[in-house]
Amino acid sequence: MSMKEEMSLVDHLGELRKRIMWVLLMLVIGMVIGLVFARSLIRFLKSVPPANGIEWNVFSPWDSLKLYMNFGLVVGLLITLPIALYHIWAFVKPGLRVSEQKASIMYIPAVFIFFLAGLSFGYFVVFPLAFHFTSSISQSLEINEVYGVSQYFSFMFNILIPLSLVFEMPIVVMFLTKIRLLNPKLLQKFRRYAYMLMVVLSTLITPPDAISAILVSIPLIILYEIGVFFSTRIHRKQLLQDAEWAQESTPE
C-alpha cells in the first residue's frame, strides 16, 4: 500500500470518527429535549385510548426514572435520525456521481416520513389490536388487570420500534440500488423468502390470531413491492446512463 493510499485511509477514518461524534452529540441534545417534554408526552399518552381509564402502577423505585429515560431516548433517536442519515450520505458522497449525490440526498426526508408512518401505523393500528387481544384473554380468565407503567410502555415500544424500522424498507432498497449494492433481479429472486419473513415478523409483533397477522403482513408486503418497483426504475436509469457514458468515452 502506498503512502498516498495510507493517508487516504487515515483521512477516511478521521472523517468517520468526526461524523460519529457529531451524531452522538446530537443524540445527547435530543435526549435532553426528550427529557424536558417527557412528562407532558407521558400524560398525553395516558389520556388517550387504550391507556385512558387504566390505573398505572410502579413496581420498583426505578420504574419512573426508567420511563423518563426511555422517552428521552426515543425522542432523541427521532431528532437524531435525519442528522445521522445526512452524515451517512456525506460520508459516501465522494464515491457517488453528481447525479447520484443529488438524488440520494432526497432520501433523508423520505426516511424520516416513512419512520413516522411506521410509528403511526404501529400506534393506531397494531398496538390497540395487541392490547385489546391480551386484555380480552385476562377478562376471559377473570384475572384482575393491574398494569405496571414500565411494562405497559415496554410492550408498546416493542411493537412500535420494529414496525417503524420495517417501514424504512422501500427507502433502504432504493438507496442500496442507487449506490449499486442491490438490483431488482436480486429482489425478485428472493421475493418468496422476503414474503415469508414478513409473515413471520407480523406474527411476532401482533396477537396470535390470523386476522391481526394478515392486517400487518399485507402492508409489509406492499412496502417490499414498492421497494422492488422503485429499484427497477432506478436500475433502468442507471443502465441507460452507463450506456451513454460508455458511448461518450468510446474513441472515434
Image: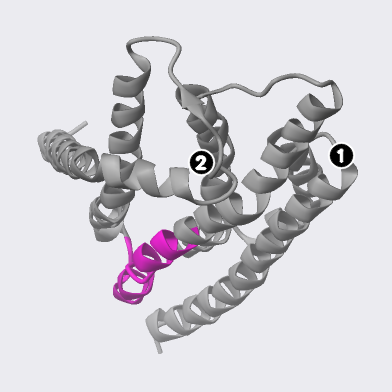
- Taking 223 as reference, is 154 above or below it? above
| Quadrant of the rendering where the N terminus is positioned | top left
Disc 1 target residue: 209
Residue in the image at 39% along x and 49% along y:
44
* Residue 64 falls in image quadrant: top left
Image location (x, y in percent) of residue 120: 53, 57
- Find out whether residue 103 is within the magenta segment: yes
Residue in the image at 39% along x and 60% along y:
112
**Residue 58 placement, left or right of 138:** left
Image location (x, y in percent) of residue 208: 82, 34
Q: Amino acid at mark 1?
A: Asp
- Taking 99 as reference, is 35 above or below it? above
The foreground one among 161 and 238 is 161
State which mark lies toward you, 1 or 2.
1
Image location (x, y in percent) of residue 227: 62, 64
Disc 2 target residue: 161
Q: Is residue 181 visible?
A: no
Label 2 crowd (10 A; few <14 / some 14-19 / many >=20)? some
